Amino acid sequence: MSGRARLALCAAAATLMACCALLPLVAEPTWLLQLVPLVAVQTGVGAAARRVPLGRPLTVAAQALATLMLLTLVFARQHAIIGLIPGPDAFRHFADLLQQGSNDVSEYAIPAPLTDGIKLMLIGGALLIGLLVDTLAVTFRSAAPAGLPLLALYSVAAGLSQGGADWLWFLVAAAGYLMLLLAEGRDRLAQWGRVFGGAPRSPGSPEAGAVAPVRTGRRIGAVALGVALMVPLALPAMQGGLLDAAGTGVGVGSGRGTGGGAVNLLVALRDNLNTDNDRQVLSLKTSSNDTSDLYLRIASLDDFDGTTWKPAQRHIVGVPDRFPTPIGLGADVKRSTVTTTVTAADWYAQDWLPMPYPPSGVKIGGRWRYEPVGMAVVGDHGQTTRGAAYQVTSLDVQPTAEQLSSAPEPPAALKREYTQVPSALPQVVAKTAKEITAGARSHYGEAVKLQDYFAVTGGFQYDTQVEVGRGPGAIANFLKKKEGFCVHFSFAMAAMARTLGIPARVAVGFAPGTPQADGTVTVSQKDAHAWPELYFEGVGWTRFEPTPTRGTTPSYTQSDTPGTSLPDQDLPSHHSSTAPSAAPSASESCTPQLVKLQGCATASAAADPSSGGGGPGPGWYLLLGLAALVVLAVPFSPLLWRLRVRSVRLGGHARTEQGAAAHTLAAWQELTDSAWDHGIPPDESLTPRRAADRIVGLGQLDPAAGAAVHRLADAVEQVLYAPRPRPAAGLAEDVRRAIEGLRGTVGTGTRLRALFLPRSSARVLWAVAARWSALRARAAARPGLRRPSRQQG
């Protein structure tokens, strides 16, 4: 197999390996199996075009045409001419599929179903990346820049993925890229012959001299890969997100906004809980006479896998003028209509719209969509709440204890969906739920007993400095340690309710804010809250409040135990004052990262990702700055290296014969490397004079630049051949003049490559390989380190 064919196969393999990072984004991996033959055909067309041979532009055009025909065959066969040649109908079908794929990406959470639109986006994007990689690495013989489209593919996948196996996909993608670099290096070595040290292992072996460089390249690649994996581990982690599960033990999964943006519903880390910077998030003006029950709901977390809670995959539609009646709400339940005008702070950018529940209508400008199951409004295509003013019409549902106690069984489908409990959930959770609710005569009685157990009788303490653990045993640990904040209480109660056969989910939003003297209500970061919602047929989804000292206890819940389930009056209360509150809103329960999601009575990281009071210090920012410099330096390292080498070569030198000779040879080396960077590879077999003629001719230099090249060649011949070389002056200026001449005769692309990806940077690898070979030779020369001979005497 020829070197270029091997390089093409490695380019195709690198593309497929990088595409593996997209596997977690969709539910079915079959698209990758379908992609393999398409990439193989695309690579084969390129190999055939180069063998003809066609020019580089024609080769790329042939591959692009073949790619389009492949996509037509797979996705638009019925709309194409003879099923292969795309026409106007085929292009319209492609547009429809892409629009469908865009809508599906907005509607579904990860992993999304493999719809035709999403499949076209995955396979089409992968083929485009494959075409770019093949063009750069094989057609234009530049494997290093081919890593950029591979990096872009991996970055998109890693940015969207929710899993913890991103490091594995990085290893796969990086291995593919290193394989491509090694293939290119082997191909170049085969063309140049033996470039540096190492004698052939056996006579007549043409590639024996390349063994050491190839092995050295493998070692360099392995070291680079190891450094790339270990450096991020040494840097401080970026914490944030709304409700980050990493530090709570009762985790919430990251939910993709069903609209245009994504909302990370994650429990915040306790490092950001104790913030002193409590900023206003929303300002309310409501028609309700009692604001103590005015919770603002953002989203519901109804998918529970034993470890995390997250929003289920739902379809979204246009916002209707009037929302339908909430599911399960009967006509005999007392209700009143409430109108609330909400104004969001200019800094508060949230994808989900905070609204009283259940809403019956909303008036707002911008791009918003409606999710019918959760009755939520979400932003579309980047729409957020930043500075938004809107009016919500909602229902104040006032069920009685009797109505809840006598509620019939919910529909079978709803009960099946909202009572699912994974087998990984520890048995102690269900056992404790049964013990707590023993003696209850209805699901309503069980729900009240659960609420009172957490809020009053169970001995739980509200504490933001908790370490409950993670994983399936998180709720069991919380029940054992009895310390946590609103996320722990709401998640635990919802999970336990499900074990009792009560449909349950978790709502995230804001607890009632602080009434002001002008009649408005101020909602701050520390009002972020999470609470469980349980379903009762005839009433619908009903709020409960298990978190002690936070929020307000619903009036329809009655405690079966002595004492009260109302919040501690000694702590800040959102409804006990009609004047502006001087004390901060109750927030010790929720972390500022939970506050991001507006999930607890504490600062929300979604609301203000940078509001952690116990936030990072100057050292953290210094390390982050250094990391940013390292990241920025990597793509510019060839440029920086060439500038440094040029400065050294053309800089000052010793005023001796030896110093002048070394300066002359260094200037000549800089000229040949600069010519190489601009597309004129060096030819070591030529004399300096013939090499100068070659550079002037191929570079099409003007007379002034050509004369500078010949003066430098004459100086080199003096150093190499004259008994007493005459020192020449102005060699550095001659080199710079020649470089300017080379730049003036090439295109913009060549100039940019010479600047940012100079070909002469290959000398770095050669130098490293040479030093390694010399080191091994010195080590082998030591008597104590010589290997015993394998020859038999």
Image (cartoon, helix red, strand yellow):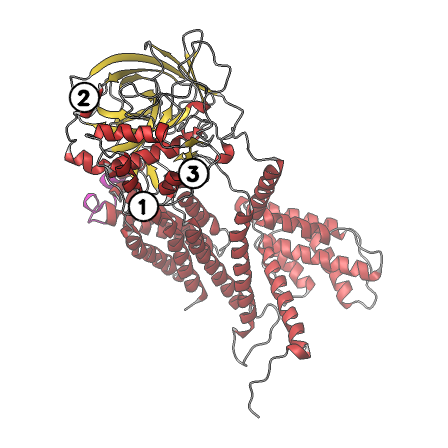
Asked whether 298 or 743 is in front, the reply is: 298
Where's the C terminus, which quadrant?
bottom right
Q: Are marks 2 and 1 in contact (CB under 8 Å)?
A: no
Give the crowd class for mark 1: few <14, some 14-19, many >=20 residues within 10 Å: some
Q: Residue at x 49, y 59 (%)?
A: 181
Does residue 250 appear anywhere in the picture? no
Q: Amino acid at mark 2?
A: Gln
Q: In x, y percent, where is residue 49?
A: 38, 58
Give the crowd class for mark 2: few <14, some 14-19, many >=20 residues within 10 Å: some
Chain part drawn in magenta: 76-95
Q: Looking at the image, which residue sits at the far front? A: 562
Q: Amino acid at mark 1?
A: Pro
Q: In x, y percent, where is residue 671?
A: 67, 55
Q: Is residue 321 above or below residue 4?
A: above
Q: Residue at x 28, y 30 (%)?
A: 449
Q: Earlier in the sequence, mark 2 or mark 3?
A: 3
Q: Which mark is residue 248?
A: 3
Q: Is residue 669 above or below residue 514?
A: below
Asked whether 162 or 90 is in front, the reply is: 162
Give the crowd class for mark 3: few <14, some 14-19, many >=20 residues within 10 Å: many
Check disc 3 and report its element: helix, strand or loop.
loop
Report whether 679 appears left or right of 368: right
Q: Amino acid at mark 3?
A: Thr
Q: In x, y percent, where is residue 362?
A: 30, 17
Which residue has dot 1 on it?
A: 426
Q: Earlier in the sequence, mark 2 or mark 1?
A: 2
Check disc 1 and report its element: helix, strand or loop.
loop
Report whether 677 appears left or right of 443: right
Figure quadrant of residue 300: top left
What's the CA distance linking mark 1 and mark 3? 17 Å
Which residue has dot 2 on it?
A: 403
